[in-house]
Image (spheres, rainbow, N blue to C red):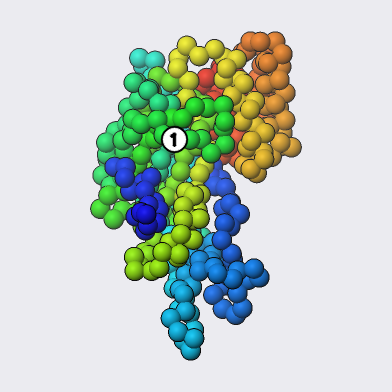
Amino acid sequence: MIRIGTRLFASVLLSVQTLSAQELPPAPVPIWSGKGDLPPNSAGHHVFLTPDRHTILVRLPQESPNVPPRVVSVPIHNDFRPSLANAVYPEPSNLYRYEYRLSNGRDAKDDIGALSLIVPAGDSSLRVPADDPPGSGWAGAPAHVAVAKQPLFSDLPLGQYVLWVRRKDLELKPGKSLDPLLVRSTYKPGLSAAWAASINPPDFDQSWPREVFEQLEKLEDRQWREKYMITAAPMFPPDTPSIRIVKHLSMAVPELAKHALIDRATPFIIDLESVLQEVVNTGAVDPKKHAISVRPRSEVERAIASVLRTSLGIKVP
């Protein structure tokens, strides 16, 4: 068996919320502060999460009846607060320039060391500067392998990652932002996911018993160590029918609301759903008739606005 110490965080280490990040998923292991009695029904458990979900507590098997079990704290390094401001600009030669400004909130405790953006597999027009922004220490490159699964949008096939990883110990500290990271493509924007991550894996003692590592495997889901954001990204080939893009947005809205990334009661989303439904009913986008009258407020709404303006020609304030 390959122990979790070499597998956890592999998605970033094997590769060279704008937007609110989602909450962590329900804990797959018991919650315990490390003090006092163990949680109910936790007999036989060696792995726990602290109430804030930022630390793994490993309660090692008791070595002898007279010696209390040793408890080891292992930070997950997931206490960062990412946001990703996005803008899309048309360029010559039918290209679009995508700009992403990554920030880490002031109340974060951990640094951000990597960002991965999901884009369509097989986009031969995709270009990512190797050192961008120049001198930032963040290197970017596409992965060229169709393994990237969208966390929300089931209508989209597996994509590939565009990866940016820090160099020279230049992680994004709490309260700091990067100058915009750049992507160029002929593909029109749609909604996609980006994952922010630390590049500091938890430090597990490889001498721990097998049963400890078997329980640690329950924490391999990347949502425990990374946080996803929803943004506008290259998504649709230039000849994609407008109705296909409209249907993508129509399917995205309830998913975004389900995960509390948008509020369907805001004026922008109410206006958006009305326009999308009218386009679906008529079967075509009419820029003279279809327009959004309300300015987007949140970063997710602004990402949606980028798709409306650039991919569909729909006016947004």
Quarter of the picture containing the N terminus is: bottom left
Q: Residue at x 44, y 35 (%)?
A: 148
Q: Residue at x 57, y 26 (%)?
A: 155
Category of crowding for the residue at label 1, using alpha-carbon neighbours closer than 10 angstroms: few (below 14), some (14–19), many (at least 20): many
Q: Which x, y percent locates residue 194?
A: 47, 39
Towards the viewer: 48 or 115 = 48
Residue extending furthest toward the bottom: 66
Q: Quadrant of residue 39?
A: bottom right
Name the amino acid type tagged 1.
Ala
Q: Quadrant of residue 141?
A: top left
Q: Residue at x 29, y 55 (%)?
A: 169
Is residue 308 in sight in this rendering?
yes
Q: Residue at x 43, y 26 (%)?
A: 120
How many marks do you count on the picture? Answer: 1
Is residue 80 in sight in this rendering?
no
Q: Which x, y percent locates residue 286?
A: 63, 11
Element marked by disc 1: loop
Q: Is residue 52 above or below residue 67?
A: above
Q: Is residue 257 above or below residue 249?
A: below
Q: Which x, y percent locates residue 125?
A: 34, 21
Label 1 sits on residue: 148
Q: Is residue 124 left or right of residue 37?
A: left
Quarter of the picture containing the C terminus is: top right
Q: Is residue 36 above or below residue 129?
A: below
Towards the viewer: 316 or 142 = 142
